Amino acid sequence: MKRTNYFGRFENKSAGAEDRLTRAFLVVLRLVPPVQAAFIDAIRERQHEQGNGPAVPSRTATDTGFSGVWSQVGNLRTDEGRVLSVLLTNQEWEGEVEIRPSDRKPVYDGVVHYGGQWVFAIENKPYGDVREYQLHPNVEDSEGLEVHPFLVVLVWKDLIRRLHALGESDWLDYTQQQLVEDFLRYAQEEFPKINPYPTLKQCGDDLDKLNRRCEDLMQDLAPDRLDRRRWGPYIRVPELEAAKVIVVSAEESNGTWAIDLALHPGDTVTQARSLYSQVEIDELLALTGDWNCSPNLHFAHMSQNLVYPSPEVSLREYLAFWQEHQTWIRQVKEEQFGDLLDLLESNGLLTGADREEFGTEFFETNRSTVNVCPGISMHYRWDRPRALDLDDNDLLMEEVDERVREAVRTWGAESAWESVLEGTREETKRNI
């Protein structure tokens, strides 16, 4: 099956193999015309910068556009045309190479026919290990093929920036948008060296790019623990017991942005039981000068959080109440709903409006049980200047680690966090 067929995968190559990156890009190139235009624009810009010889025509100036795209083939698939050697790499190319015909037996990473007269011979080197002989095409059996003498070097970071720009535009339909997003996600996860936004500064004030940087931070901090839900990426840490999810994200803040570290201990019945059996209230309250900590009480049914009461007590009173009433941290049956609500309302953890909402979601439905989840929301935020400074000095990941430690230390889970990090480091070493 043709490699650039969407379903024609490399079964014997790892996700991070450069051949798979080539194939993925060529599939997007083949299926998304705006990506073709962006690719041609990148080639034309580089040729105009070099100022040597004719440039390929723009995408709108050709009648045929892309007439063929192949990957991992041994010939150029035509006997006529002008062959342009295109190098995709992770850094700017230093030095000049005069492209000439070669008698080597090639395996081209990519071959693209464009505009009825141009043939692109693509060599992909995302790790920078370029061998010059691989840049020279073989045309010895095709008298109608003319080799263009000037190499075009495209840096992956520039190409990916162009794809980001396309993704943020209105030029793509839904399917095209998903293909581009899937490629960007794949490239980000499997080829971090070609990530165009390795620091917060390079993300500007774009929240989407900033969140991609946050995702990289989480990946770097806890490799192989990055997971995803519909609301975004997170670090999966069941070993912490009281809080099994850690999130680093960018958010709008006072007309600019901040980086937010969030933990939600006690988010489920099981987590809340663990939390209140171990938490040191004074230690947790000591964090509130730097952390924003607040009650996160909610009532759930079948893993769906339905009611979020608004306790009218201090955080200390809230924590002390649940530490004293741990027997109510469970699934409560319908015949005990009244006792539960009376207890919470009399202690300032439930308002009249909260009680009405509970009635709508439980008494007026067929839900005969409720899961009582007396959680806490913990947020540590770095404002824009502080986050930029830490990241510029390669200290932001270390700072996130330290803040996670001081949070989980309040319920005795720092050693579990350290074990998570040690385990991911060992796994990373085995995969190298």
Image (cartoon, rainbow, N blue to C red):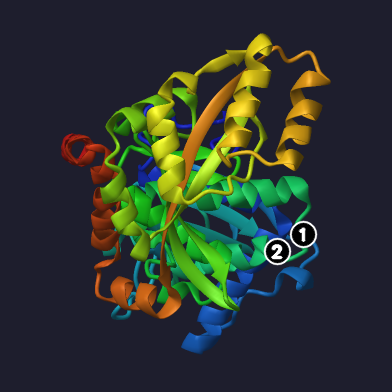
Alpha carbons under labels 2 and 1: distance apart: 5 Å
Q: Tell whether label 1 touches label 2 (CB within 8 Å).
A: yes
Q: Residue type at mark 2?
A: Gly
Q: Which residue is drawn at the image coordinates 72% and 57% (left, top)?
A: 33
Residue 227 in picture, x, y percent from top left: 44, 38
Mark 2 burial class by Cα count in 10 Å: few <14, some 14-19, many 20+ = some
Q: Position of residue 225 (x, y in %)?
A: 35, 38
Task: Residue 121: tell me if it is visible.
Answer: yes
| Disc marking residue 220 | none
Residue 246 or residue 78, whichever sits in front: 246
Q: Is residue 324 above or below residue 162?
A: above
Give the answer, above or below, for where 301 lies relative to 60: above
- Dividing the picture into quadrants, the one containing residue 6 is top right
Instruction: Locate residue 331: give its quadrant.
Output: top right
| SS category of the residue bearing label 2 | loop
The relative height of residue 308 versus residue 108 in the rendered view (above or below) is above
Q: Secondary structure at mark 1?
A: loop
Q: Residue furthest right?
A: 364
* Residue displayed at 78% across by 34% down: 356
x and y percentages locating residue 324 in the rendered image? 39, 29
For this rendering, which residue is in front, 184 or 413? 413
Dot 1: within a 10 Å radius of its alpha carbon, few (fewer than 14), some, or many (20 or more) residues?
A: few
Q: Which mark is residue 115?
A: 2
Which one is nearer the viewer's eye here, 189 or 297?
297
Given the image, on which type of amino acid does mark 1 rest?
Thr
Residue labelled with disc 1:
64
